[in-house]
Image (tube, rainbow, N blue to C red):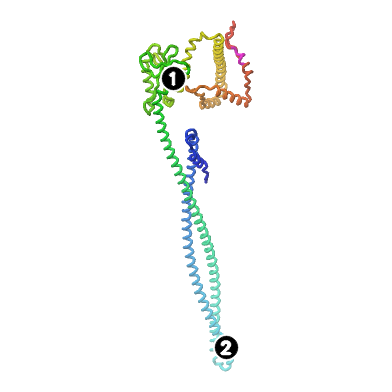
Amino acid sequence: MDNNYDNLKRLLDNLKTLGFWSRIFRWSKIKNQLIDASADIQKLLTNNENLQSQSLTSEQSISNLTKDLKISNEDLIKKQAEIDKLNLSVDGNSTKIFTLTSELSSANTTIGGQQERINQLTSDNRLFTEKNEQLLRDNKKLSENEATNTQTILDLNKRKGELDIELANIKKDLEKVQEELSKIKEQNSQLLTSEDARKQEHLQQTATLKNIQDTIQTARDKEVQDKHNDEIERLKNLKLTWTNHQENVKQAIKSISGKHTIEYVDKVSFKGEPDNTLKICGEFVVFDAKSPRGEDLNNFPTYIKEQSEKAKKYAKEDNVKKWIFFVIPSNTLEVIKNYVYSLADYDVFVITLDSLEPIILSLKKIEEYDFAEQLNPEDRENICRVLGKFAHLSKRRIQIDTYFINQFMELAYKCESDLPSDILEKVVEFEKAEKLNPPQEKRVKAISITELEKSTKKLRIDASTKGISIEDIKITDGLNQLPLYIPERPDTNEQGES
């Protein structure tokens, strides 16, 4: 029986010491411990069921032993009755033997008297000659009686020996029955002691299980109540956030425009009243704050789509940029599926408060592009150099990828043509089972150069441990031998291979 409940104890200890920040940032760990603790609870329930099953088995065994003991007692009583009957029979036989012995003694006394009389008659034989024949006949009768008495005594002695043997056998059977009775009583005592211990242990474990169940139920009730309170607090914060969203957007845009010297227009000269308007490069850029009307966010995408169509009143005005920006709360992004609405004459972009500054700065770059002719020669050369490197790197990457695509295609054709059919079928099965998932690109997350460097460093370490040469100089020399453009030769226009 496995009585190890460390996971459950660890969960209860963590729940006792769980703070507010731990509930927010370490709730996944508590969930994992809940899963482990549920396994311990299941184990505890299983042990309880096993104990109940063992208790029922023990009770059944005790019942069977009690029945056997009762049968043994009944057999013992019967044997005791038989022993008493045999004892009575022995007592009766002893009485008979005593009686026969008395009769034998009397007969011996009579024989002695008769012998004396014979001696007397013999001595008086002369005197009683006439009575000799009569005395001889009497003597013969006495001899016959003596032989009969002797035979009777022998039969009685033989019967006494048989009764002694039977009595000895009965005593042996009685000793065996008494030994079996003693063993049964000892086993019954042991079983009763063991059953009391089992019942005590079962009661203790039942009480422990009840305490654990009460503790878990209390913790669950508290967790449900905390979740309920957190949800109420979240809804209150959402309502407050959505109520103040328009003012927050306005203050943020004013702060950004003041920080980067961008003109914020309080009163527009065209028809309509947009929430916020910036003037960049002689054009009005509209930033409207949009937030949900209620707690249900399911209708928010439909509301954004309807407002996008109504934004036409701004886009049709002169000097208004055809890019309209809707600023929504960050906590509503989960229900938004479409971030760009491309309509006939204008585009609507759905953004959050966090992305206002980079978007406004990117719009401000338009002014810098208009004044690019005013840059000094060194700045213009640096810009051209960077753009040239980007163009060269893009073309070189396309060229190398095309080369490897051709190699992979050639290898795939060789697999289909050169591999045996049975191996090819197995390869196709494994190919169908494989799935390649490249990293997913997210709109609001920029690709970090630091993370790319960490990934590259890890790949270099893994390659070095497997004996793969990754020396940059050798790889660069090999790639540089691959021409970027097709050389102009009169015979062939084929691209050279490295």
Identified at 44% across, 38% down, the residue is 223
Judge the density around disc 2: few (<14), some (14-19), many (≥20) Cα neighbours within 10 Å: few
The residue identified by callout 1 is 254
The region drawn magenta spans 478-483
Image spot of residue 321 (x, y percent): 41, 13
Task: Find residue 352 and report its horizontal and vertical position in percent.
Answer: 44, 22
Q: Secondary structure at mark 2?
A: helix
Which of the two discs, 1 and 2, labels the residue nearer the N terminus?
2
Say whether residue 458 is left or right of residue 29. right
The relative height of residue 152 versus residue 330 in the rendered view (above or below) is below
Question: Where does the image place residue 121, in percent across and percent down from the top left?
Answer: 57, 90
Residue placed most toward the observer, 37 or 246? 246
**Is mark 1 in CB contact (under 8 Å) with mark 2?**
no
Going by the numbered disc 1, the residue's amino acid type is: Lys
State the residue in front, 478 or 58: 478
Residue beneath disc 2: 116
